Structures are given as structure tokens and as C-alpha cells.
Image (tube, grey):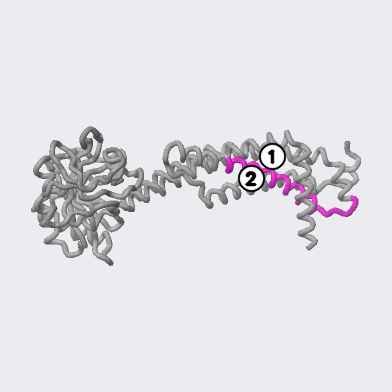
């Protein structure tokens, strides 16, 4: 109880000192506020980007292997000339993969023609993605149907002139009516809409279903050449339950080498990609950004810490007589130490709170302006308060220690 009473008195002393010296308090807060703002704002942006990217990546499927021409690799040593002459995955290879793999739950094929123009009467949509998909695509890619239905296997096999469209295309072409059953024009051909995708919102990875038109792959093969790099055709394979990506990758490597009749010493002329590759690269990238945030904010916090220490030395100097009187009346050294240390911590925490408030306001403004999910997480709030408290303890300890070690007689005599 005595300790709690001393803490209460120390806090009251500290608050009184901060209120009396308003200008000095405000100037001392700036360094800490700017430092916390710099660090936490960087972490908030990084965390929000990482969460949005992870959501986009997870929509591709954590247990899906993509058989492609180009590997998902990054860095200066990317040997593009080695991969440039590789053959593209072909639609004919799809059935071979299905037939030869035993660990796959679903196998499908996809080709994407970007920059398509879709027309309905006098309305048109530009830069849409014209996508051809094979059967079992719906078992691999995560999406929801808003209206209508998805393709049947027969419709995909026989290449019917039907399609599904994304929510953005629906909003542009059919703002006040249902799209299902209407006939649109794409790539110079007429297509009947049998379904629409539920709106997903913008995707950091560019894999949103909102601005796409999906047709059966055998229909797409009749109007466009899917054996072009521009369409980036690929086979996607989803593992059975209980099968790891590594097991599926090992099997698919053998299957593809067999299909393409590669000799034992020949290198693979295909890539087996998985979303984990992107996640690993993102963790490394965001790690560098976080370090940069610590460096940038660290200088501001360092300056703010020196500012608080300087202010506390001045405060000790101004209140030397009071310290002498307190000691002569029986105040212990730890009470004097606690009194000034609490003042420094409160000053630092107040600066940190101001910095966090500015970050929070910034997230609200940025989120409304850029349609981006920017969130100040509880973890970052606690981090900001923790860093502020530590800086307050470090900055205030030496002045508080010097105050606690004063001789009461000499302190009372000082002017």
C-alpha cells in the first residue's frame, strides 16, 4: 500500500510539472511523436500490404502447383535467357497429367488474354481479361457465383459460346438489370452470359474475378491461339487431402519429364510453382522495409530521447530546493527517483500516443482515398507504447538518479 501511495504521489507530481511547463512539454513531445509516427506508420503499411497480399495469394490455393514456362523467382541472377526457349504448357498435356498423376485431387488448364474489349449494345468495357478454363477449374480456384451458374463439363468439352463475367463488368454493362441470359460481344464473337461472379474487390496480386470474362477453354481455342507467351497458359494441379506440396511436386516433375521425353541428364524445361515461393520472397522484402522503418524512426526517437533527458535535467535543477525539503521531511531516495522517472515516462508515453493518433488518422484518410485496407493493429499500438515507455525510462533515469542522490542540506541552500 505504501508503494502504491508513493506511485500515486509521483504521478501527481509528474502531471503537475508537465502542466505547469506547457511549452517545454510540447517541444519535448515532438521528437518522440515523430519517431513513433515514423516507425509505426511503416509497420502499419507493411502489415497491411502483407495481409492484403497474403489474402490474394491464399485465393490461388495453398495446396496448388502451377505448371508453367517461367519460374516464380526474383533477384539479379534470374537466368531469363535459360527459360525463354522453354515450350509453353499445352492443352494436350493436361489430359496426360490427369491420367498419370495419382496424388492430384483436381487438374485444370487456364489461358488469359488481357486487354479485351467487351460490348453490350452501346456500352463497352475495355482492358478486361478474357480467360479460357478447362473442367475442374472451379475445384481449384476460390470464387463465388452471384447470379446464374457455372459451366457443366459437357459445355467445357464441346466449347459452347457461353461465359461468366465479373462484378465490375456487370456494373458497367448492366447497371440496372440482370446480366444472366444477355448476349455480349467479346473478341468479335457473341457470348451468352450464364452466370456472374460475386464482387471480390481489388487484389494486390491482380487475380481478382471482378474484371474477367471466363469461357470454356475449347471455345477459346477456336478463336484465339492459346500457344502464345502473351496468354501465359498453364496447368494447375491441386493436391489430395493429406498430400503435401513437396510430394505432389516430386510426382509432377516425374510426370512432366515423362510427357516431354526428357533424358535423365537434361534439365527440366518447365517450372513447378507454388504460392509458398511468393510468400518467402515477400517475407524477405517486408523484412528490409521494416528495418528501414526502424532506422528512420530510430533517429527521431534518439533525438527525442536526448530532448527528454535535457528537459529532465532542467527540471531537476529548477526543483532542487523542493528536493531538499522533501528529503529533510523524510522522503527516501527511491521516492525522488520514482518521482522524476515517472515524469520522464509520462512525457515519453504522451509523445508516443500523439504519434499513434496521427498514424490512426492517416490510416483512415489513406483508406478512404485509395480504397486500400490500411489498419493500425493492436500489436503495433502496443509496440508504439512499449518503445515510448522504454525511451522514457532510459532518458529519465540519469536525471532522476542524480536528483535522488542529492544532499538535502546542499539542495535547500541552492538557488
- Mainly helix, strand or loop, the magenta region? helix
* Relative to 139, residue 203 above or below: above
Left/right of residue 96 with respect to residue 41 in the rendered view: left
Q: Residues within 10 Å of mark 2 (few under 14, many from 20)?
A: many
**Does the image show residue 83?**
no
Query: Which of the two discs, 1 and 2, labels the residue nearer the N terminus?
Result: 1
Q: Quadrant of residue 25?
A: top right
Taking depth in this image into account, of 144 and 360 the one nearest to the observer is 144
Taking depth in this image into account, of 229 and 84 the one nearest to the observer is 229
Residue at 57% over, 37% down: 299
Task: Tell me if label 1 and label 2 are in contact, CB under 8 Å.
Answer: yes
Name the image quarter holding the N terminus: bottom right
Left/right of residue 395 with respect to residue 328 in the rendered view: left
Q: Quadrant of residue 202?
A: top left
- x and y percent of residue 295 in the render? 52, 39
Q: Residues within 10 Å of mark 1 (few under 14, many from 20)?
A: many
Q: Residue furthest bottom?
A: 242
* Disc ID at residue 272: none
**Does the image show residue 172?**
yes
Residue at 65% over, 46% down: 349
The residue indicated by pointer 1 is 308
- x and y percent of residue 280 in the render? 35, 50
The residue indicated by pointer 2 is 391
What range is drawn magenta here?
328-357
- x and y percent of residue 133 in the render? 18, 50
> What is the secondary structure assignment of the residue under circle 1?
helix
Name the image quarter holding the C terminus: top right
Amino acid at each position: 500500500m505504501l508503494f502504491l501511495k508513493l506511485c500515486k504521489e509521483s504521478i501527481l507530481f509528474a502531471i503537475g510539472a508537465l502542466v505547469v511547463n506547457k511549452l517545454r512539454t510540447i517541444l519535448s513531445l515532438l521528437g518522440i511523436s515523430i519517431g513513433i509516427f515514423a516507425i509505426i506508420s511503416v509497420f502499419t503499411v507493411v502489415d497491411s500490404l502483407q495481409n492484403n497480399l497474403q489474402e490474394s495469394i491464399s485465393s490461388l490455393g495453398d495446396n496448388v502447383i502451377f505448371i508453367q514456362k517461367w519460374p516464380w523467382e526474383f533477384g539479379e541472377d534470374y537466368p531469363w535467357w535459360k527459360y525463354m526457349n522453354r515450350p509453353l504448357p499445352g492443352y494436350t498435356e493436361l489430359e496426360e497429367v490427369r491420367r498419370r498423376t495419382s496424388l492430384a485431387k483436381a487438374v485444370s488448364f487456364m489461358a488469359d488474354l488481357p486487354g479485351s474489349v467487351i460490348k453490350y449494345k452501346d456500352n463497352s468495357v475495355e482492358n478486361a481479361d478474357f480467360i479460357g478454363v478447362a473442367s475442374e477449374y472451379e475445384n481449384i480456384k476460390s470464387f463465388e457465383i452471384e447470379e446464374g451458374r457455372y459451366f457443366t463439363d459437357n459445355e467445357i468439352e464441346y466449347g459452347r459460346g457461353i461465359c461468366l463475367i465479373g462484378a465490375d463488368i456487370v456494373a458497367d454493362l448492366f447497371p440496372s438489370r440482370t446480366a444472366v441470359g444477355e448476349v455480349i460481344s467479346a473478341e468479335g464473337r457473341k457470348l451468352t452470359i450464364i452466370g456472374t461472379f460475386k464482387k471480390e474487390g481489388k487484389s494486390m496480386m491482380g487475380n481478382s474475378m471482378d474484371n474477367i470474362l471466363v469461357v470454356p477453354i475449347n471455345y477459346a481455342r477456336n478463336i484465339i491461339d492459346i500457344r502464345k507467351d502473351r496468354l501465359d497458359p498453364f496447368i494447375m494441379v491441386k493436391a489430395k487431402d493429406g498430400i503435401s506440396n513437396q510430394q505432389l511436386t516430386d510426382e509432377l516433375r516425374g510426370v512432366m519429364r515423362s510427357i516431354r521425353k526428357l533424358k535423365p541428364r537434361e534439365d527440366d524445361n518447365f517450372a513447378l510453382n507454388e504460392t509458398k515461393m511468393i510468400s518467402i520472397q515477400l517475407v524477405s522484402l517486408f523484412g528490409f522495409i521494416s528495418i528501414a522503418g526502424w532506422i528512420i524512426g530510430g533517429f527521431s526517437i534518439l533525438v527525442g530521447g536526448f530532448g527528454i533527458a535535457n528537459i529532465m535535467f532542467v527540471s531537476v535543477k529548477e526543483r532542487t530546493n523542493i528536493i531538499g525539503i522533501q528529503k529533510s521531511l523524510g522522503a527516501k531516495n527511491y521516492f525522488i527517483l520514482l518521482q522524476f522517472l515517472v515524469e520522464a515516462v509520462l512525457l515519453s508515453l504522451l509523445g508516443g500516443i500523439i504519434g499513434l493518433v496521427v498514424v490512426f488518422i492517416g490510416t483512415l484518410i489513406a483508406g478512404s482515398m485509395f480504397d486500400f485496407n490500411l489498419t493500425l493493429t493492436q500489436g503495433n499500438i502496443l509496440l508504439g507504447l512499449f518503445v515510448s515507455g522504454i525511451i522514457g525510462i532510459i532518458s529519465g533515469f540519469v536525471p532522476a538518479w542524480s536528483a535522488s542522490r542529492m544532499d538535502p542540506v546542499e539542495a535547500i541552500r541552492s538557488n
